[in-house]
Image (cartoon, rainbow, N blue to C red):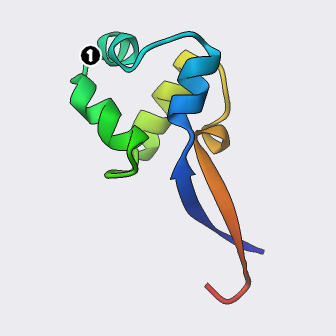
Amino acid sequence: MAYKIGRCLLLDLLRKKDMSQLQLAEIMGIRVQQINKYVLNKQRMSLQVAKNIATILNCKIDDLYEWIEVGNEE
């Protein structure tokens, strides 16, 4: 089974944690504009960034994106 990355679910996770993009950016020591790029699907997170965000939000890395099943072809 193969999957491709769908839309970023970061905004949904932030809302559930009652945390703003600015708060997350400050915790991570990065600019809020970078968080916004992830939220708007303009840029994908690196594995390192995804791990750090997942740790902060107490979720799994898999929870940060929707995963689309593409079968065995891709």
* Relative height, residue 17 to residue 61 (above, below): above
Quadrant placement of the C terminus: bottom right
Q: Residue furthest bottom?
A: 73
Quadrant placement of the N terminus: bottom right
* Relative height, residue 49 to residue 27 (above, below): below
Q: Is 20 on the left or on the right of 17, as rendered? A: left
Q: Is 32 on the left or on the right of 73, as rendered? A: left
For label 1, the SS is: loop
* Relative height, residue 69 to residue 48 (above, below): below
User: Which residue type does callout 1 highlight?
Assistant: Gly
Using a 10 Å C-alpha cutoff, classify the residue at mark 1 as few (fewer than 14 neighbours), some (14 to 19) or many (20 or more).
few
Residue drawn at (56%, 10%), measured in percent from left and top? 18
On the image, the x and y values in percent for residue 2 come to 70, 74
Q: Is 72 on the left or on the right of 34, as rendered? A: right
Residue drawn at (66%, 58%), measured in percent from left and top? 67
Residue drawn at (61%, 13%), measured in percent from left and top? 17
On the image, the x and y values in percent for residue 39 come to 42, 39
The total of numbered circles placed on residues is 1
On the image, the x and y values in percent for residue 32 come to 26, 24
Residue drawn at (32%, 52%), measured in percent from left and top? 42
Among the 4 quarters of the image, the one containing residue 61: top right
Q: Which residue is mark 1?
A: 29
Most foreground residue, 51 or 70: 70
Q: Is 63 on the left or on the right of 53, as rendered? A: right
On the image, the x and y values in percent for residue 57 come to 58, 19
* Relative height, residue 62 to residue 3 (above, below): above
